[in-house]
Amino acid sequence: MKDRLGSVLYVGKAKSLRKRVATYFQSSRRKAVQQPKINAMLGLIHDFDFIEVRNESEALLLEGKLIKEWKPRYNTDFTDDKRFLLVRVDVENPLPRFRLVRFRQNEQSLYFGPFAHSGLLRKTLGEMRVRFGILLGDASPRRQEDGTWRLYDDARAEIYGHANEVTAESYAERVRAACVFLEGRSREWLGELEAEMQAAAEERNFEKAADLRDIVFALRGTLARTRKFVRTPRRDGDTLPVLGELRERLALPVLPRRIECFDISHISGTFCVASMVSFFEGRPDRSSYRRYRVKSFVGNDDFRAMEEVVGRRYRRLNDEGKAFPDLVVVDGGAGQVGAALKAFLAQGLEPPSLVGLAKREETVVFCDGRAPLQLGAHNPARMLLQRVRDEAHRFANTFNAELRGKRMRESVLDDFEGLGVVRRAALLERFRTLKRLRAASVDELQEVEGIGPKLAERLYAFLRERS
């Protein structure tokens, strides 16, 4: 529902939009409900837009996506995350602490979440305190005369096993490493929540699916906001030491000034796409990013998809006489690395240095038979590889989401008999949007190749019935 200026007032869904919308304007219903907020909204409504999807699951997901995107003033669901725990990192303080909160209180702090499982979250923070030496909300560090900080005055200093006297700079490295870890763990939980949400929707448990969707969308938004802090490249002059560290630890023949990274994204084998991101001297070179639709097969095969897109990328560079990057990274372990190497060898191309970064333990996997390498959580080379990998993951998921959204908009044509893939594609190419297609006359429909007079009349009637 929109006002005269085109601003979105409200987003809703229903099996019958005609009946749903009518209830807002029936005087008997309005008197029964007696909601001043709804009455105020009705005075502002000037126009409606609608999107038709194939089933309730798609409607549920799309409704939440649009509410999160537009934040309509008259929607109350799915607009906040006050029911769930957040992790707040007080990065504005000299020694940031990791605290559990339920509200966003300021924009200076860094937030992770929301998280639905409080017990798991508390356990994870406890593990992070031991692993990274960070401070939680129960700590009271004390500044000493020489400017250093003493974190604990009791036995916790020995229990947690990290240096108890630190500078603000050395502690900041602990915080940065912990944030990288928490962001990665958040992404693991996001994947689990998305799978649980899809399963609930398929089982038609839409109340549970809606609750999970609220968490998923809020967690996605938080991850997008935290990237700015966690993944910010270092200042000018600081990247070369990191690249030198990466060269030394991976035994690379040259300094990896140009790094390219690949990731595959799909939903149970559908909408299979890939991304390639490029970093130059430790910084994203977005003008060189590329994205691919997997064309050689349909299904769930990450290895085959990786082989295809890596082959396409470097076959083209070779044909154009352009230089290969200094380092190629793939998101995954030995299987993905082997698939990428196969793409080079199948075309008789000399591969550059090639590694994989396996998510579970952030292990570096080599293509030349060397044993996998574990870099420390605080190691700057590892953090750079993670930054590159996560950017490829984000770029692939964004492309996948765009294709799914387009598919939902086009899905109404699937229910029209006698319209194959070629003619459906021709219609969408001619009219671009479903809205324009619905507005087309019979004569305009016939202008599309393959659409004859009878088919045009049937399609025209079909679209009017679905409007």
Image (cartoon, rainbow, N blue to C red):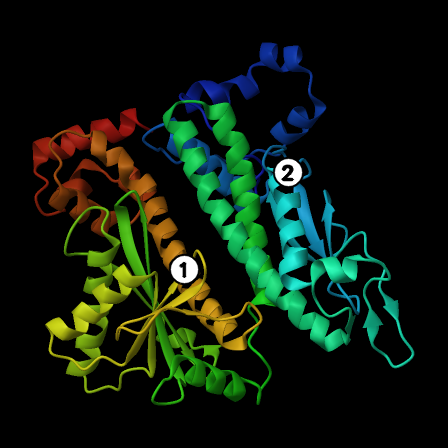
Task: Tell me the element at label 2.
Answer: helix
**Residue 293 rendering spot, x and y as whole percentages:** 24, 57
Q: Residue at x 35, y 74 (%)?
A: 260
Q: Are marks 2 and 1 in contact (CB under 8 Å)?
A: no
| Pointer 2 or 1: first along the chain | 2
Task: Provide the residue designation for mark 1.
Answer: 393
Using the rendered view, name the quadrant where residue 236 is placed. Answer: bottom right
Q: Which numbered tag is attached to residue 119? A: 2
Q: CA distance from mark 2 to mark 1?
A: 28 Å
Task: Tell me the element at label 1.
Answer: helix
Whether 440 is drawn above or below 365: the answer is above
Q: Which amino acid type corresponds to the residue marked 2 in the rendered image? A: Gly
Residue 7 visible? The answer is: no
232 sits left or right of 426 in the view? right
The quadrant of the rendering that contains the C terminus is: top left
Q: How many marks are shown on the rendered structure?
A: 2
Using the rendered view, name the quadrant where residue 269 is placed. Answer: top left
Q: Residue at x 77, y 68 (%)?
A: 164
The 10 Å Cα crowd at callout 2, few under 14, some 14 to 19, many 20 or more, is few
Q: Which amino acid type corresponds to the residue marked 1 in the rendered image? A: His
**Residue 244 rendering spot, x and y as whole percentages:** 47, 87
Q: Residue at x 43, y 24 (%)?
A: 17
Using the rendered view, name the quadrant where residue 195 is placed. Answer: top left
